[in-house]
Image (tube, rainbow, N blue to C red):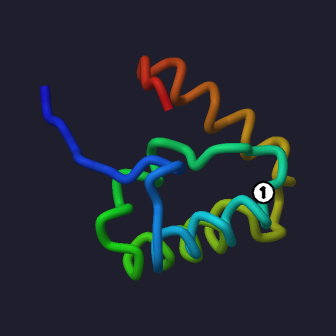
């Protein structure tokens, strides 16, 4: 099983702490960074690009609202037995 090293919320300093802070500020319902995003925490510059891209693709206005997209993502994760 692969292992990806990442930086936990309480261990974040400097640039990664700032990326985490901005994410949490934009997502107040999430008290901690999602693990799927922490996978990129060793590269704060890339993590920010992933966050920006993801929000642009997943949460921009379109045929489905954010709630519907989140429900679809949750169902797909459950079907894939993904812990994220």
The image shows residue 28 at horizontal and vertical percentages of 83, 53
Nearest the viewer among 17 and 58 is 17
Report helix, strand or loop for mark 1: loop
Q: Residue at x 58, y 64 (%)?
A: 20
79 vs 49: above or below: above
74 vs 21: above or below: above
Q: Residue furthest left?
A: 1
Q: Residue at x 50, y 76 (%)?
A: 48
The image shows residue 35 at horizontal and vertical percentages of 46, 42
The image shows residue 57 at horizontal and vertical percentages of 62, 68
Instruction: Say left or right for 75 vs 64.
Output: left
**How many numbered discs, if any?**
1
Nearest the viewer among 39 and 66 is 39
Image quarter of the N terminus: top left
Q: Residue at x 66, y 60 (%)?
A: 58
Task: Give residue 55's quadrant in the image.
Answer: bottom right
Circle 1: is it few (<14), some (14-19), or many (20+) Cα within 10 Å? few
11 vs 76: above or below: below
The image shows residue 33 at horizontal and vertical percentages of 58, 49
Task: Give residue 40's quadrant in the image.
Answer: bottom left
Q: Residue at x 78, y 57 (%)?
A: 27
**Which residue is the site of mark 1?**
27
Task: Give residue 60's quadrant in the image.
Answer: bottom right
19 vs 45: above or below: above
């Amino acid at each position: 099983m692969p292992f990806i090293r990442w930086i936990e919320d309480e261990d974040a300093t400097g640039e990664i702490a700032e990326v985490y802070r901005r994410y949490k500020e934009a997502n107040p319902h999430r008290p901690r960074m999602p693990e799927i995003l922490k996978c990129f925490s060793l590269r704060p510059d890339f993590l920010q690009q992933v966050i920006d891209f993801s929000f642009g693709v997943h949460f921009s206005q379109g045929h489905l609202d954010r709630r519907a997209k989140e429900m679809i993502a949750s169902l797909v994760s459950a079907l894939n037995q993904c812990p994220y």
